Amino acid sequence: MPRKQSSILGLLTISLLAGCAAGDTGTADAQLEARARQIHDAVIPIDTHDDIPFDFATADVDPLDADRQVNLEKMRAGGLDAGFFIVYVGQTERTPENYEAAKDGALTKFDAIHRMTEMYPDQIELAYTADDVIRIHGEGKLVAAIGIENGYVIGRDLSMLERYYDLGARYITLAHNGNNDIADSAQPRSNIGDEPGENGGVSEFGEQVIAEMNRLGILVDVSHISKEAALDAMRLSRAPVIASHSSTHALAAHPRNMDDETLMALRDNGGVMQTVAFDGYVKIQPPERDEAVDALRDELGIEGGGGRSALESLTAEQRAEYDRRMAAIEERFPDATVSDFVDHLDYAVSLIGIDHVGISSDFDGGGGVVGWDDAAETFNVTLELVRRGYTEEEIRKLWGGNTLRIWRDAERVAAQIQEEGGA
């Protein structure tokens, strides 16, 4: 064959192959998404941390369609089958009056979660056991579970643990931002009198709290507490622990994230770290970004950190200016994405194994990344996992299987302890 004819045929072949490759890419993407949809529908996605306000499940905050990251409609749209709704009360100075206020605040949120299930009984039901999750999901309803964020709400009254358990609490974060009587925080607060390491990790009272949580079947949550406290909790707890919303310190050096030593201890404990899609814990931004945002807020007179209520005080013209300039800042310093988030999952799985890693959002408590910024976008996490080669069984474990396993472990340990004590 003459060289010229051979060259022409070669060019035609390359052109045809390129066209096929482009078509193949589109086909491959469609097949990957279809596979991800199949897996997402087959597993039970459980998000272990969704915050609520004190006026949740009222006319002002309707759980069905309120303008929040998590509502029932968005859960359905995104295939988020189950969520731990959170009884959170912030840390204050430890006074008798504040202990009582914290208990009252906790009971208000318990009432709100129960009220949600009473308002929409055909759509969502409260799970008290791991088996309840399977049953409720099988009946076609969404699943609500309850976690407590900040053991401060028991004050120094161990009997409150059983009261909260009876109301549905199935994990308790030992401390939050600020030390309490149970454990040291990863972020102590000097403005309420905290001394770093004042408890030396978990206090003597905290040891009693963990023992009682084990007896009842409440998971010990080590998110938000200091490294020393987390290691203490793993040593003290007879049941595996949960880190309900944390990420990896190796990829984002935030005090809230777990370093390799702590992750290895959690693996040895049999526990699970619920990797959290919280922008600031997934990706550490350079100081220049905070400086630019602070300057913009100062210029527009925005107080309170730029939260929703502060932004609502702006005029229409000011809000337009704020949105325009924030977009420019975000273009220079992009927010964390679903891909960045799954990097943390990858890291943890590689370090401690697929059986010890889960998924959480911290929605309506500051959580969210580009691509998974509300419950309606939940599928995007599964899509990214499939894109990276995770199997259906691995995704099942990450999305809820591991959570159900340690929940059952806590139930089993509680039954053993109660049998030992003749309860």
Image (cartoon, rainbow, N blue to C red):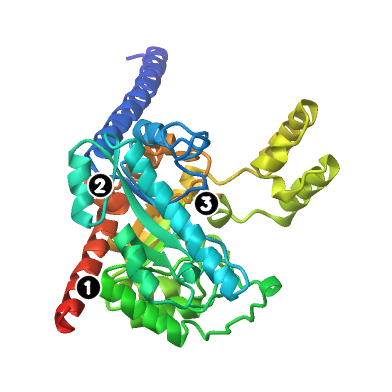
Say which residue label 2 marks: 391
In front: label 1 or label 2:
1
Q: Mark 1 Cα within 10 Å, few/some/many (few <14, many 20+)? A: many
**Secondary element at image label 2:** loop
Q: Is residue 249 left or right of residue 395?
A: right
Quarter of the rendering containing residue 375: top left
Q: Is residue 348 left or right of residue 34?
A: right
Nearer to the camera, 272 or 383: 272
Quarter of the rendering containing residue 313: top right
Q: How many labels does the image show?
A: 3
Name the kind of residue labelled 3 in the image. Answer: Phe
Q: Mark 2 Cα within 10 Å, few/some/many (few <14, many 20+)? A: few
| Residue in the image at 85% along x and 42% along y | 299
Q: Residue 33's x, y, as percent?
A: 32, 31
Say which residue label 3 marks: 278
Name the kind of residue labelled 1 in the image. Answer: Ala
Q: Earlier in the sequence, mark 2 or mark 3?
A: 3
Name the kind of residue labelled 2 in the image. Answer: Thr
Q: Which of marks 1 and 2 is nearer the N terminus?
A: 2
Say which residue label 1 marks: 414
Question: How far apart, in angstroms, are the residues tagged by discs 2 and 3?
Answer: 25 Å
Q: Which of marks 3 and 1 is nearer the N terminus?
A: 3
Whether 166 is drawn above or below 377: the answer is below
Whether 312 is drawn above or below 88: the answer is above
Q: Mark 3 Cα within 10 Å, few/some/many (few <14, many 20+)? A: many
Q: Residue 75's x, y, as percent?
A: 37, 37
**Secondary element at image label 3:** loop
